[in-house]
Image (spheres, grey):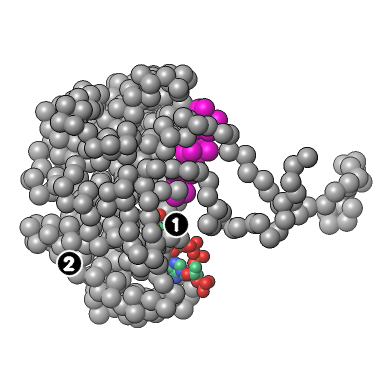
């Protein structure tokens, strides 16, 4: 007999309920600590690259030079997307949300690379390579095609982040721009049991293919309480407009019980360690490019927001500074969450590999609060509200 669930055990939003055992990443929300496979995020941001970080997350160890060379080569050789995927992207409405375009194209990718044998190591490896390689190509293609520009084919002689910016602009970017994007990708690659990862894991637990796993996670990441906040932060900054208006705007917004976008986190009770690094990267880039206005405004919002929300343990999260950075890179605001996705695909797939190694179908319980034993009333005798 199954154990009856009591109201006492219910945790809204599954807060503090462990959903898996994992050795991929670790977060301490009080200390502001995030580690990938035991290595602190600041170390990764200072010394690693996104592809090396992906390898670490996926396979559990830092790669040797040969392993990294092979992984990077495999990824650069699989960047192209089939012309039919490009055709599919061309058919999508230009006013649609880029996350929907990405989700549709990733689901369609799975039709070209059937991966039903999810326990086959070859299928696992090549699915991971294809998804990490092709997601940036899809994003860049939609970024250009919806403006009426032609898509730019990827280059396999250019590093991951540079290649992405190249596919947006047809120019190999300045190294400082590519480095800043690569750091953003490292910082967004993984973050324990968050909503999109959980969503992907639920799909993975049915032994669905990895393209469906990523498509599920993409749908969840899109929401404004999760990855969608990056875009909302920039809208909020644009609405504020100038440093002088910050305090009045924030006070009004909080009085109306609206949240400050890019602030707050289920786990962090201090400033998100990724926001600390991103702020420095954004400052460096803004100075290099002479474009610091949005960042100056963001820093003022942080200062006043901290003052107003500190008592609740609410501080800037990873999404707070990434928007200002992506704007400096010339990326359209509604594409910001797709950059998050381009990074997080590695984390989602690391969890996919971990999940299916020792799988159990996710099938949580619920607390039923409805009636029992009601009579079926024939349609000609039904009166709304009276039964
Ligand atoms: N601005 C103002 N108040 C806030 C904020 C915020 N950004 N975040 C939380 N609060 C307040 C709530 O109003 C609530 O106050 P109350 O107790 O007086 O009612 C209290 O803090 C608890 O908030 P919850 O939303 O219940 O806490 P939860 O842990 O579910 O929130 C969340 C986490 C969803 C991220 C929330 O902080 C939020 O909505 N932030 C804004 C959106 C955002 O930036 N999301 C990105 C998160 S990072 C990521 O997903 C990559």
Q: How far apart are marks 2 and 1 (CA)?
A: 26 Å
Considering only vertical position in the picture, is 348 above or below 383? above
Q: Earlier in the sequence, mark 2 or mark 1?
A: 1
Q: Position of residue 209 (x, y in %)?
A: 46, 26
Q: Can residue 16 be seen in this view?
A: yes
Q: For the residue with label 1, is its CB less than 8 Å from the closest atom of ligand 1?
A: yes
Residue with the mark numbered 2: 293
**Residue 54 versus residue 309: which sits nearer the camera?**
54
Q: Which mark is residue 165?
A: none
Magenta region, residue range: 194-208
Q: In which quarter of the image is the N terminus?
A: top right
Q: Residue 225 carries which label?
A: 1
**Residue 83 versus residue 123: which sits nearer the camera?**
123
Considering only vertical position in the picture, is 257 above or below 116? below
Identify the residue at image location x=55%, y=30%: 206
The reply to whether callout 2 and callout 1 are in contact (CB within 8 Å) is no
**Residue 251 versus residue 86: which sits nearer the camera?**
251
Identify the residue at image location x=28%, y=36%: 61
Q: The residue tagged with tag 2: helix, strand or loop? A: helix
Identify the residue at image location x=25%, y=80%: 244
Q: Position of residue 203 (x, y in %)?
A: 51, 35
Q: For the residue with label 2, is its CB less than 8 Å from the closest atom of ligand 1?
A: no
Q: Where is residue 65 in the image (x, y as percent from the top left)?
A: 15, 31
Q: Quadrant of ligand 1?
A: bottom left
């Amino acid at each position: 007999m199954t154990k009856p669930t009591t109201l006492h055990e219910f945790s809204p939003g599954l807060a503090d309920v462990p959903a898996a055992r994992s050795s991929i990443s670790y977060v301490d929300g009080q200390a502001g600590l995030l580690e990938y496979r035991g290595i602190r995020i600041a170390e990764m941001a200072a010394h690693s690259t996104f592809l090396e970080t992906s390898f670490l997350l996926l396979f559990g160890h830092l790669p040797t030079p040969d392993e990294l060379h092979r992984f990077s080569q495999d990824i650069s050789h699989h960047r192209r997307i089939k012309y039919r995927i490009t055709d599919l992207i061309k058919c999508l409405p230009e006013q649609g949300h880029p996350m929907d375009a990405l989700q549709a194209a990733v689901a369609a990718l799975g039709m070209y690379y059937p991966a039903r044998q999810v326990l086959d190591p070859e299928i696992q490896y090549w699915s991971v390579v294809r998804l990490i390689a092709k997601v940036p190509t899809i994003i860049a293609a939609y970024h250009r095609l919806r403006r009426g520009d032609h898509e730019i084919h990827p280059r396999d002689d250019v590093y991951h982040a540079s290649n992405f910016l190249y596919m947006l602009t047809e120019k190999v970017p300045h190294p400082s721009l590519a480095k800043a994007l690569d750091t953003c990708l490292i910082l967004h690659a993984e973050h324990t049991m968050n909503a999109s990862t959980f969503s992907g894991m639920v799909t993975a637990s049915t032994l669905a293919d990895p393209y469906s796993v990523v498509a599920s996670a993409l749908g969840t990441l899109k929401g404004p309480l999760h990855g969608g906040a990056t875009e909302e932060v920039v809208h909020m900054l644009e609405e504020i407009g100038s440093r002088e208006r910050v305090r009045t705007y924030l006070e009004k917004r909080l009085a109306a019980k609206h949240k400050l976008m890019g602030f707050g986190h289920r786990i962090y009770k201090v400033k998100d360690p990724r926001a600390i690094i991103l702020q420095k990267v954004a400052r460096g880039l803004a100075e290099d490019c002479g474009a610091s206005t949005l960042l100056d405004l963001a820093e003022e919002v942080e200062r006043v927001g901290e003052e107003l929300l500190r008592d609740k343990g609410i501080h800037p999260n990873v999404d707070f500074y990434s928007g200002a950075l992506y704007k400096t890179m010339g990326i359209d605001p509604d594409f910001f969450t797709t950059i998050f996705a381009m990074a997080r695909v590695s984390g989602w797939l690391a969890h996919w590999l971990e999940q299916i190694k020792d799988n159990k179908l996710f099938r949580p319980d619920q607390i039923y609060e409805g009636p029992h034993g009601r009579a079926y009333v024939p349609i000609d005798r039904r009166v709304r509200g009276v039964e």
